């Protein structure tokens, strides 16, 4: 407990030294990112401090107790960042994480489809390989804050003949490119938190694949298993 109290005092001291009510929010977020306090439980080589969950809670509580704005939140910090940390390459971590932590990049998830909501294995959005990249076509739905996002976690089918639970790839996808049409879904309250996203011949590079792709022999094993279970 003593170590946690010391940590809290250290964080409060840093906050009081660096906070200025007249600074732009962008500058404050950059300061939090540089200190590691924006994502304290992320690894040290990924803009964090490698803290335990208890220590991270102390940091966040200290910021709240000082009544100061916290770091950026949302799907980028909660989902995209941790996925890239766990499964991305060093180049992808250096390319995507800084903008997530400083709030310069807003992310959404492009998972659910009209006929593939809770069953993602049924998704039909396709990515066809062409000239060092992929051409994406399909439709996503119930995409929270897609109208505000400039990047997305996109799941698309890259192998049309693999069993439906295989042949799916995770892409870091540029939402601001031509071929991406975001249409808000109006709720009874008048809000438009959710969106439909129509993708028509949009592109994504090979080096935006996060987590790699299954090798041919791995897909063949899955095909055999799928056929066996379907008998």
Image (spheres, rainbow, N blue to C red):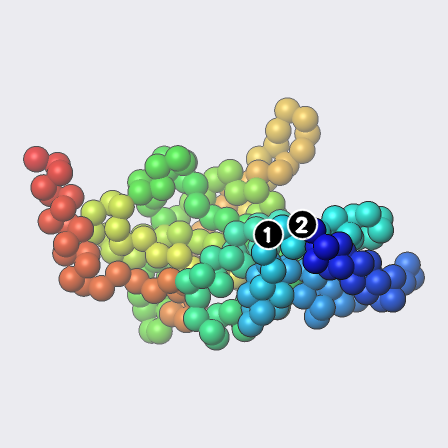
Q: Residue furthest top?
A: 188
Visible in this render: residue 19? Answer: no
Residue position for label 1: 53
Q: Quadrant of residue 105?
A: bottom right
Where does residue 118 sit, x and y in percent of width and height? Answer: 39, 35
Image quarter where the C terminus lies is top left
- The answer to whether the residue labelled 2 contacts the one labelled 1, judged by CB atoms less than 8 Å apart, is yes
The one of 143 and 103 positioned closer to us in this rendering: 103
Q: Secondary structure at mark 1?
A: helix
Where does residue 23 sit, x and y in percent of width and height? Answer: 87, 64
Task: Identify the residue at image location x=85%, y=66%.
Answer: 18
Q: Is residue 32 left or right of residue 219?
A: right
Task: Identify the residue at image location x=72%, y=55%.
Answer: 2
Residue position for label 2: 57
Where does residue 126 sit, x and y in percent of width and height? Answer: 33, 53
Where does residue 79 sit, x and y in percent of width and height? Answer: 52, 52
The one of 101 and 132 positioned closer to us in this rendering: 101
The one of 190 and 2 positioned closer to us in this rendering: 2
What distance separates the C-alpha of mark 2 from that of mark 1? 6 Å
Location of residue 201 with respect to 122 vertically, above or below: below
Location of residue 59 with respect to 225 vertically, above or below: below
Q: Secondary structure at mark 2?
A: helix
Location of residue 126 with respect to 196 vertically, above or below: below
């Amino acid at each position: 407990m003593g170590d946690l109290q010391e940590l809290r005092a250290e964080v409060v001291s840093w906050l009081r030294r660096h906070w200025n009510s007249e600074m732009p929010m962008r500058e404050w977020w950059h300061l939090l990112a540089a200190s590691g306090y924006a994502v304290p439980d992320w690894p040290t080589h990924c803009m964090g401090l490698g803290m335990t969950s208890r220590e991270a809670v102390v940091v966040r509580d200290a910021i709240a107790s000082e009544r100061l704005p916290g770091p950026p939140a949302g799907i980028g910090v909660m989902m995209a960042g941790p996925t890239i940390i766990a499964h991305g390459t060093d180049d992808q971590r250096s390319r995507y994480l800084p903008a997530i932590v400083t709030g310069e990049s807003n992310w959404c998830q492009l998972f659910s489809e009209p006929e593939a909501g809770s069953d993602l294995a049924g998704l039909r959005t396709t990515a066809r390989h062409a000239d060092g990249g992929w051409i994406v076509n399909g439709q996503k739905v119930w995409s929270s804050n897609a109208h505000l996002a400039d990047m997305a976690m996109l799941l698309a089918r890259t192998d049309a003949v693999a069993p439906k639970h295989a042949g799916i790839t995770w892409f870091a996808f540029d939402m601001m490119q031509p071929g991406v049409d975001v249409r808000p879904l109006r709720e009874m309250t008048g809000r438009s938190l959710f969106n439909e996203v129509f993708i028509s011949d949009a592109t994504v590079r090979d080096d935006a694949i996060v987590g790699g792709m299954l090798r041919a022999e791995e897909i063949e094993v899955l095909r055999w298993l799928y056929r066996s279970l379907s008998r």
